Image (tube, rainbow, N blue to C red):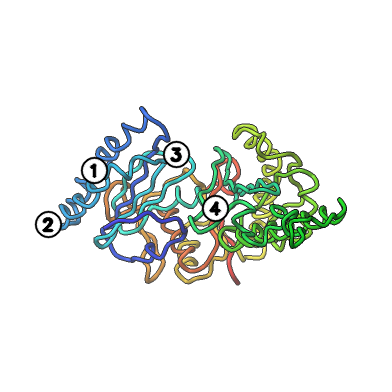
């Protein structure tokens, strides 16, 4: 059994027993490149056969391989791809993420989920939403440093004013509404008609604001950038209750922008915000460490994580430190990467911190404030 999921973290990651399989693979959106994706996935499955043999009985190993092979053989699954997939197996089930950023090919068998690439994909430190709107319709996009893509709305969410307002859509039947009993219309001035249209627009924008908040911003907490004509900026900002709506936006008709142009304009606005956020996190760590409320010592942070004392962990995204953590004591046992009994200590700390409700932020090496691969701020 396997299913595609979108929420992160997912309750599936609360499993605390192996064997656990984590697979990452870049994929392609278009043919003919996409035809190679299921073949590459089958090659990934082959990579986990040997490590599974070290910790599984033959029957259990074969059931895991059979489930993953079902995914590789599911032709419908491979029709619509984004830039990568992440597949996780545990206890006879698998979940799959379609990712909007490239990822390195990776196959890991361990007692823990390998989630560092997934955190990088979902963390708000380099993702954002873009809302393009006019008085007829709207489109929501999600972007990051790698690209920007349109967000697919649920089928029951209309995205145009006529469907949203239905019979209350004043503008579409102003003349009929003001007609006399014998078809003789009552004349009304431009100002009156303009007020009715403005009322339609405001009601439509309130609907959009609620949809974006309830279905996206409330959970993701991503910055929201508005792209619209100046007159729509003023209306939407006046009625919006979304705290993640940025003060700055793009004042133009979003329909005229290509995806590449939209990405460039968005990153000009977003990059300074993310740089400041990273600087604030680093400053917070330095202040905490000076008061003995933070550490970059891996062994100390591991014990603090197990004791639920880590508030925020800054982790070097591409660093791997082989070993495992005793979940009872927090003590570290060093090992060899590739053996299923050992994993990546930085990954395991990230997983523990997240399961305890702490914050995890992945940073590139040149942004890290320490050379150990980790910088943790404690709760107390």
The residue located at (40%, 41%) in the rendering is 81
For mark 3, does the 10 Å Cα neighbourhood hold few (<14), some (14 to 19), or many (20 or more) residues? some
Q: Earlier in the sequence, mark 1 or mark 3?
A: 1
Q: Is residue 50 left or right of residue 209?
A: left
Viewer-proximal residue among 314 and 71: 71
Q: Earlier in the sequence, mark 3 or mark 2?
A: 2
The residue wearing badge 2 is: 59
The location of residue 273, given as percent across then percent down, is: 70, 48
Q: Is residue 92 above or below residue 228?
A: below
Q: CA distance from mark 2 to mark 1?
A: 21 Å
Nearer the camera: disc 1 or disc 3: 1
Q: Earlier in the sequence, mark 4 or mark 2?
A: 2
Q: Is residue 62 above or below residue 357?
A: above
The residue located at (58%, 49%) in the rendering is 370
The residue located at (19%, 50%) in the rendering is 66
Q: CA distance from mark 3 to mark 2?
A: 34 Å
Q: CA distance from mark 1 to mark 3?
A: 19 Å
Q: Is residue 329 visible?
A: yes
The residue wearing badge 1 is: 73
Query: Which corner quadrant holds the C terminus?
Result: bottom right
Q: Is residue 373 visible?
A: no
Q: Is residue 25 above or below residue 215?
A: above
Q: Earlier in the sequence, mark 2 or mark 1?
A: 2
Query: Which corner quadrant holds the N terminus?
Result: bottom left
The residue wearing badge 4 is: 123
Nearer the camera: disc 2 or disc 1: 1
Q: Is residue 95 left or right of residue 67?
A: right
The residue wearing badge 3 is: 83
Q: CA distance from mark 4 to mark 1?
A: 31 Å
The location of residue 287, given as percent across then percent down, is: 68, 60
**Which structural element holds mark 4?**
loop
């Amino acid at each position: 059994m396997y299913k595609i999921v979108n929420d992160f973290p997912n309750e599936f990651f609360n499993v605390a027993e192996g064997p656990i399989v984590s697979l990452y693979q870049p994929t392609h959106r278009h043919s003919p490149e996409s035809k190679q994706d299921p073949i590459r996935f089958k090659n990934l499955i082959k990579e986990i056969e040997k490590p599974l043999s070290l910790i599984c009985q033959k029957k259990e190993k074969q059931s895991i391989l059979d489930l993953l092979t079902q995914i590789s053989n599911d032709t419908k699954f491979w029709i619509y791809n984004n830039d990568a997939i992440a597949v996780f197996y545990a206890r006879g089930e698998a979940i799959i993420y379609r990712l909007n950023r490239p990822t390195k090919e990776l196959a890991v068998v361990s007692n823990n989920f390998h989630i560092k690439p997934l955190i990088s994909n979902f963390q708000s430190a380099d993702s954002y939403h873009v809302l393009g709107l006019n008085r007829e319709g709207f489109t929501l996009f999600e972007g990051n440093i790698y690209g920007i893509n349109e967000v697919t709305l649920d089928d029951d969410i209309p995205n145009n004013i006529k469907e949203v307002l239905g019979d209350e859509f004043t503008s579409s039947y102003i003349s009929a509404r003001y007609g006399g009993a014998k078809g003789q219309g009552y004349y009304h001035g431009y100002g009156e008609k303009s007020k009715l249209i403005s009322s339609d627009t405001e009601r439509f924008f309130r609907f959009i604001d609620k949809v974006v908040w309830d279905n996206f911003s409330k959970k993701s907490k991503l910055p929201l950038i508005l792209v619209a004509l100046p007159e729509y900026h003023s209306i939407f900002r006046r009625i919006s209750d979304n705290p993640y709506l940025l003060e700055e936006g793009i004042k133009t008709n979003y329909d005229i922008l290509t995806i590449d142009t939209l990405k460039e304009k968005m990153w000009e606005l977003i990059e300074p915000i993310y740089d400041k956020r990273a600087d604030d996190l680093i400053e917070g760590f330095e202040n905490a460490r000076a008061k003995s409320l933070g550490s970059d010592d891996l062994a100390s942070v591991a014990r603090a994580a197990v004791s639920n004392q880590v508030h925020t962990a800054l982790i070097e995204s591409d660093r791997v430190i082989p070993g495992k953590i005793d979940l009872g004591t927090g003590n570290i046992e060093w090992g060899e990467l590739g053996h299923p009994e050992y994993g990546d200590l930085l990954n395991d700390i990230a997983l523990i911190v997240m399961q305890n409700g702490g914050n995890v932020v992945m940073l590139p090496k040149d942004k890290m404030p320490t050379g150990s691969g980790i910088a943790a701020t404690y709760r107390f």
